[in-house]
Image (spheres, rainbow, N blue to C red):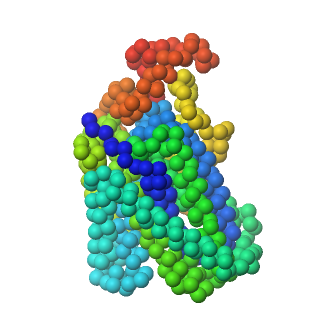
């Protein structure tokens, strides 16, 4: 079977990662967060959430360095935790990513509607009290087809366009930062918190939404097989993605609170966009709006590509129909998987932003589960494969702290009455339905022997596992029976399925 073509450079991989993280709404909805938590609460909360995300990214870096294969988290969890965990990881990622791509179908036209009222004409239908208009739907479907077409002949063209859009975002962001700090004053930012809230309370309440701002860093791991880079450098890029994204967020937001008193920005409709316009820099106000548009486009592109790679990894081991793993010989593109993503994105996108919000809000839970599974994989890896040689090891227990933050995201979403609670009953129905559908697919999916499955998932990196199991001296792990299990697997005997 043909392999995915390794064509991404370091800059392209980083651009796909960072631009896939830096979305759209943060730069014009920050007025709402300023009003709720104060400018300091929002900025420091995002920074703390970013630190927790970076701790999880350390585990990603270690595992990506070992196994730079399409599907990222699916590969790690299947290899160490077993078939069920591998499917759960992939199904959670598909749920989160498809929810976002489908939301972008109408979000693009809705965002354009802020500058042209024509997008709000010709309503077609209303779902969840939100109308869907023909111009909005047409613009979104055309955009989806363009993104699909850019990847039909391989990821290289899309990556090149992503680099250009990412560069424009950075240039505009630097202009906002320079003017914000140069023309503004620290008195506009100070005091940074609301008078009726304790600083610690404001920051901690923003940590959970702050973590959701950087969940897309896993794109780098998912696209590892597309990268023409040494494994160690791919692993480092995962962590660098988080650092760059959080730095960009915090500096642009701080500039927005520096250019005008943040209390004024808190009362505006479009946050940073309105703040720079009112401060006398309308061109930069439009620049901030351009970041919103570019953020949507880059996130859409990155998630569209990543979803196809997750589907490929699941199909390689018969957890989805085998034909979805087919790679086109000359282009190196997973065309069947891309067609599947296109179809599902458009079908769900037809529901409109009102209904898609139900799907989108459950994404934090799905990604929180994935983070926990990845961190568990990192610590269980040396127990299952005690002789494996790791070029990089995540330091200490930092990833566990990050996983604790992920658990916090899940708990706050599931418990009614918190700032992050799911909306009853729609979003709880979507959540339960997604798990039920996944359970049905798992029960009806085809079976594959573990050794064959790992060969499909890991490709040439499968040899590392075989060597690790054959190189452990008897009793070296200090676990009863460990050396016996290692000998049986090294000799080609059957190995029990983890988690089965």
**Quadrant of the image occupied by residue 244:** bottom right
Report x, y in % for residue 56: 58, 46
Q: Nearer the viewer, residue 484 or 407?
A: 484
Report x, y in % for residue 258: 67, 76
Is residue 62 placed above or below 455 in the rendered structure?
below
**Residue 310 shows in the view:** no
Is residue 360 placed above or below 317 in the rendered structure?
below
In which quadrant will I find the N terminus? top left
Residue drawn at point x = 73 percent, y = 76 percent: 186
Q: Nearer the viewer, residue 414 or 37?
A: 37
In which quadrant will I find the C terminus? top left
Residue drawn at point x = 38 percent, y = 58 percent: 160
Report x, y in % for residue 93: 43, 49
Q: How many marks?
A: 0
Report x, y in % for residue 123: 30, 80
Residue drawn at point x = 62 percent, y = 65 percent: 250
Q: Nearer the viewer, residue 276 or 52?
A: 276
Is residue 415 placed above or below 291 in the rendered structure?
above
Residue drawn at point x = 38 percent, y = 27 percent: 450
**Quadrant of the image occupied by residue 214:** bottom right
In the image, is 498 to the left or to the right of 261? left
In the image, is 466 to the left or to the right of 123? right
**Residue 473 shows in the view:** yes
């Amino acid at each position: 079977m043909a392999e995915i073509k390794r064509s991404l450079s370091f800059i392209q991989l980083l651009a796909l990662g960072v631009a896939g993280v830096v979305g759209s709404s943060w730069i014009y909805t920050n007025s709402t967060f300023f009003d709720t938590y104060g400018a300091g609460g929002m900025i420091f909360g995002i920074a703390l959430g970013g630190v927790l995300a970076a701790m999880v990214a350390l585990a990603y870096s270690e595992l990506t360095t070992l196994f730079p294969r399409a599907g990222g988290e699916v590969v790690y969890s299947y290899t160490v935790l077993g078939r069920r965990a591998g499917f759960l990881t992939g199904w959670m990622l598909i749920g989160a990513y498809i929810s976002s791509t489908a939301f972008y179908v109408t979000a693009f036209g809705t965002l354009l509607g802020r500058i042209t009222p024509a997008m709000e004409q010709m309503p077609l239908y209303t779902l969840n009290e939100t109308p869907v208009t023909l111009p909005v739907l047409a613009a979104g479907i055309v955009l989806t087809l363009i993104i699909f077409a850019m990847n039909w002949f391989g990821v290289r063209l899309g990556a090149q366009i992503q680099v250009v859009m990412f560069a424009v975002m950075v240039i505009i962001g630097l202009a906002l930062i320079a003017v914000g700090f140069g023309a503004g004053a620290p008195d506009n930012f100070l005091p940074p918190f609301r008078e009726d809230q304790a600083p610690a309370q404001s920051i901690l309440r923003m940590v959970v939404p702050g973590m959701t701002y950087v969940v897309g860093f896993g794109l780098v791991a998912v696209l590892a097989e597309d990268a023409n880079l040494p494994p160690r450098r791919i692993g480092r890029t995962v962590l660098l993605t988080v650092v760059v994204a959080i730095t960009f967020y915090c500096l642009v937001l701080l500039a927005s609170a520096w250019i005008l008193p943040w209390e004024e920005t808190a009362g505006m409709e479009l946050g940073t966009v309105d703040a720079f316009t009112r401060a006398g820099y309308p061109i930069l106000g439009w620049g901030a709006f351009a970041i919103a548009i570019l953020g949507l486009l880059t996130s859409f592109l990155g998630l569209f590509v990543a979803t196809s790679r997750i589907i490929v990894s699941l199909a390689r081991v018969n957890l989805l129909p085998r034909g979805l793993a087919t790679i086109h010989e000359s282009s190196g593109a997973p065309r069947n998987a891309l067609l599947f993503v296109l179809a599902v994105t458009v079908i769900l996108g037809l529901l409109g932003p009102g209904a898609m919000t139900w799907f989108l809000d459950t994404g934090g839970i799905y990604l929180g589960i994935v983070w926990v599974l990845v961190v568990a994989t990192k610590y269980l890896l040396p127990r299952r494969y005690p002789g494996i040689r790791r070029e990089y090891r995540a330091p200490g227990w930092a990833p566990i702290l990050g996983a604790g933050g992920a658990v916090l995201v899940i708990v706050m979403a599931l418990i009614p009455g918190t700032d992050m609670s799911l909306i009853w009953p729609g979003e709880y129905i979507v959540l339960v339905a997604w798990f039920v559908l996944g359970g049905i697919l798992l029960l009806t999916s085809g079976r594959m022997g573990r050794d064959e499955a790992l060969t499909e998932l890991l490709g040439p990196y499968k040899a590392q596992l075989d060597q690790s199991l054959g190189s452990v001296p008897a009793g070296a792990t200090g676990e009863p029976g460990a050396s016996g299990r290692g000998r049986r697997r090294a000799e080609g005997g059957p190995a029990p399925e983890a988690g089965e």
